[in-house]
Amino acid sequence: MAARPESPYEGTITTWNADRGFGFITPKVDGPEIFVHVRAFEWGSAAPYLGQKLTYDIGLNADGKRRAEHVRPVESAARSGRLPMAKDSASYLAIPAFLALSIVVGVLWGPPLWVGVLYIAASIVCFIGYWVDKAAAVAGRWRVPESTLLIPGLLGGWPGAILGQQIFRHKTKKVGFRAAFWTNVVLNVVLFVLLSSPPGRQLIENTFSYWVER
């Protein structure tokens, strides 16, 4: 595929709504502000911020209004010719780290298969939840409650939540939510290890037998 020519327009983000994923660019040359959506940035780019200098093309939306397209930060384009990964992409490291821990736990104690199924199912639920909430935020519709996003993560869906956060660039900046999210991740991992151990599995079996016999 032929390389796309450099964008002819340059400007600065002067308005940005991180929750809804859009804002406006003030052109370097005098002219009206240009609407820009987070989807106009190339995949893997850093999160947009106020004062960020950009290059961009101009296109039209379905209503015939002008909008920015093929947006690239000036600094990144000049330095390396490609956009850096988002700063929060370090969150991805939690997934292979947990996978490695799961392999160790599996070799040592062999947790039941349904545990892995639970993690996969809960991750799918979390990923869909972030997708729905991001779409609602952009469209200005009713939002998914934060507790609804957090609970499946505590049950094992946090890997899917991380993927949803990074792919949709959603819930990656709100400090309170991030603290609650990572607290859930730590609690889930600790519970996974404890309940997979022989004493933990014995506790689960005894508890299950107690309730069955009642």
Image (cartoon, rainbow, N blue to C red):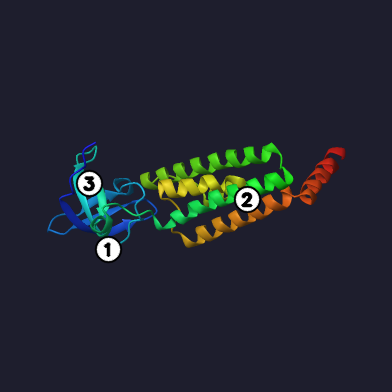
Give the residue number, with chain letter if any, for mark 3: 67
In this rendered view, identify the residue nearer to me: 107 or 148. Answer: 107
| Horizontal relation, residue 146 to residue 76: left or right | right
Q: Disc 1, disc 3: CB below 8 Å? A: no
- Determine the secondary structure under disc 3: strand
How far, Cα to Cα, is label 1 from label 3? 18 Å
Quarter of the picture containing the N terminus is top left
From the viewer's perspective, is the residue at label 2 or at label 1 nearer?
2
- Determine the secondary structure under disc 1: loop
User: Mark 3 Cα within 10 Å, few/some/many (few <14, many 20+)?
Assistant: some
Above or below for 195 versus 79 = above
From the viewer's perspective, is the residue at label 1 or at label 3 nearer?
1
User: Mark 2 Cα within 10 Å, few/some/many (few <14, many 20+)?
Assistant: some
Kindly identify the residue that appears in the image at 51 percent across and 58 percent down: 178
Give the residue number, with chain letter if any, for mark 2: 101
Q: Position of residue 82 (x, y in %)?
A: 29, 51
Q: Position of residue 63 (x, y in %)?
A: 22, 38
User: What's under tag 2, amino acid-wise?
Assistant: Leu
How many labels were placed on the picture?
Answer: 3
Q: Earlier in the sequence, mark 1 or mark 3?
A: 1
**On residue 51, which mark appears?**
1
User: What's under tag 1, amino acid-wise?
Assistant: Gly
Kindly identify the residue that appears in the image at 68 percent across and 44 percent down: 106
